Image (cartoon, rainbow, N blue to C red):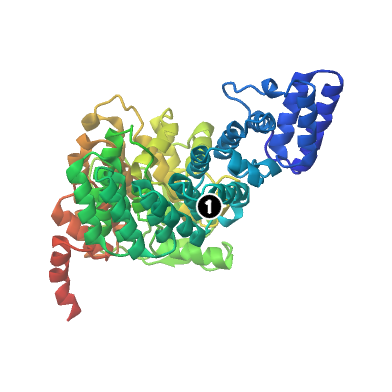
Amino acid sequence: MSEGEDDPHLSAEGELALARLALAQGDLRHAAGHVAGAIAYAPTMPEVHETLARIAAVSDGGIDLFPLEQHVFVGAVVARAHLLAAAGRPGEGLELLAAATGHAPQADWAGVPWVTAPELAERLDPERSARILMQVCAAVPDPVPKAARTPLRPYLTLARHAVTAHPEHGLLLGAASALARRVSEIELAIQWASRGVRAQPSKLGEVWLGYAYRSAGRTREALAALGRAVDHDPDDLAVYADIAGTLADNGRLDEALTWIDRALARDPTFDCAVHTAHRLRHQRDGRVGHLVALADFARDHLDDSHEHGDLAECCRGRPWLGQLTPAGGPAVEALRRLTATDRTAEGPPLRLPAPPPPSALRTLAVARPGLRVLTAGVTGPDPRLPRRAGVRPLWRYSGDGVVPLVSTPSAEAVERIRQLAHPAWPHPPAAYDAAVGLATLDGSDLLGLLAHPPTAPPTALGRVLGQDPALWVRCVQVWTCLGLLHHRTDEPWPDSARRRMLLDLVWGVEDWTTEAALFALVTAAWVDPSVRPDVAGVVAARLADAVAVGRDRPVPILVSLAHLALATPDLDEASTLLAWQAAGVPPRRGRLRRLWERLARPFRR
């Protein structure tokens, strides 16, 4: 089935025309294939089911024309489901429809009369009905977005009929509650789950009831139900994590951590408890070490019971943990003003109080060709000079402009970075993994991308990023430096080319590439514990240098460097406190918070 069809109804009619032609010629196999295609396009279209019935009538039920083979087409699965129901095997048919819903939840596979008929629930064993409803629930989010609930309505109707036919079946009532909760029928979910635990008290029933209460915002009742679930089964540590999450969502972090500690005391490796513990501890004090420990745990336990989103949740929207920081400084502010006013290069020159970073100068030159930029004299350490001797520079200042000292990148390198560059990522290890696509590029290509970033691609994201030229350039530079981490990975880290090139950028001319290279080093420390002491030392030294320079003149990248330091594994406490001060955001709680308060007190007088 091709994607992007303008009219699924017309596509289904085309498949049906071919199916009827094949049927008239006695070619049942091709007729079945075209009907399967029609069902995939329009699963509730009456003509589709009429043609399917014709095939069944001339082929002894037609079930064998739709075998369950490896990589079976979803339309064939749904066709077989309908034929099984017609043959008196509706339970098997429902299981296949639920599987189709799991494969493509947006399609209305179950929106047919036989699924919503009251007599179906009476014929089905309630245990089987419960399992089918649970299968559907496992395939969809909780809650399901409003626009995506229609395909689940037939299953909810089935649930209503089933609980009417079997009003005392605890498992069925609980599964029905779970489905009702997902489509935001919250009061119905509470009603069914309450009936379920009264009819058959159980751990699972109390969990379903607790979730229903939690969805209704009735936290006290939710915690009570989940507590009873623990009483039923003290060894189910997932419930402990649910209680902790509910408490944390309501601002009761200390109580939440008490429950997590109880779970970890029973099993210190239980994945749900470990993920929740690190997330809540980071939520409490903001220390990045909790997230690094969580990343280490996830890397060492790839066979976890299910996927967790705690690390991504904690990193989302946070500087350098989940996204890059916007560029700062007079040059960028001037560029944004020019972009907003659509000013051309004609007119008076742009006067800046100090030489801006090379990347900012180049971005100005590309965005406004011919614009003259004049800078005032330098006070304090010269930003046009490397911060350490012996580094290989990317740039050379010439008058009030800048000249790249590396060649332009290849067309292949440009294409790859344009496909990859993005201002956000789930967390540093995920960013590292995503950058592997740059691994085969030459080092000269990667350095070339830093000094000669290409234009944004003609995609929706590219058009958005292209509206802020500085943001796009930073995206290119950040992902290019992540690509450097994959350069010659067979070389031991201490003497590797990748480390040397990144350090040249870190200690080169004060620039956006300084931040990008430092982020790559920080990311290396996240994914490889053996390099953490080295990276922490580099970050601490670079931050201290920027703070020292900042006493004599503005350092546009200082706040960003501070956030990078706060994302660094195993950074020493003094540097961490310095980073909090430079970032201008106090620690949340703990000893660093007390130190911050003591140091900040004189400035409040």
Question: Percent x, y for residue 605?
Answer: 17, 81
Judge left or right: residue 258 versus residue 564: left
Q: Residue shown at 64%/43% (left/top)? A: 119
Q: In what element is the residue under mark 1?
A: loop
Question: Percent x, y for residue 556?
Answer: 33, 60
Q: Residue shown at 31%/37% (left/top)? A: 501
Residue 2 falls in image quadrant = top right
Q: Residue shown at 56%/51% (left/top)? A: 164
Q: Nearer the viewer, residue 263 or 127?
A: 127
Q: Residue shown at 43%/27% (left/top)? A: 440
Q: Classify 549 as above or below 151.
A: below
Identify residue for label 1.
144
Q: Nearer the viewer, residue 508 or 29?
A: 29
Question: Percent x, y for residue 170?
Answer: 43, 47
Judge left or right: residue 584 versus residue 447: left
Judge left or right: residue 18 versus residue 119: right
Q: Nearer the viewer, residue 520 or 138?
A: 138
- Amino acid identity at mark 1: Val
Judge left or right: residue 151 versus residue 537: right
Question: Percent x, y for residue 85?
Answer: 66, 33
Q: Is residue 549 visible?
A: no
Seen from this angle, which residue lies furthest bottom? 605
Q: Classify 136 as above or below 354.
A: above
Q: Classify 198 as above or below 521.
A: below
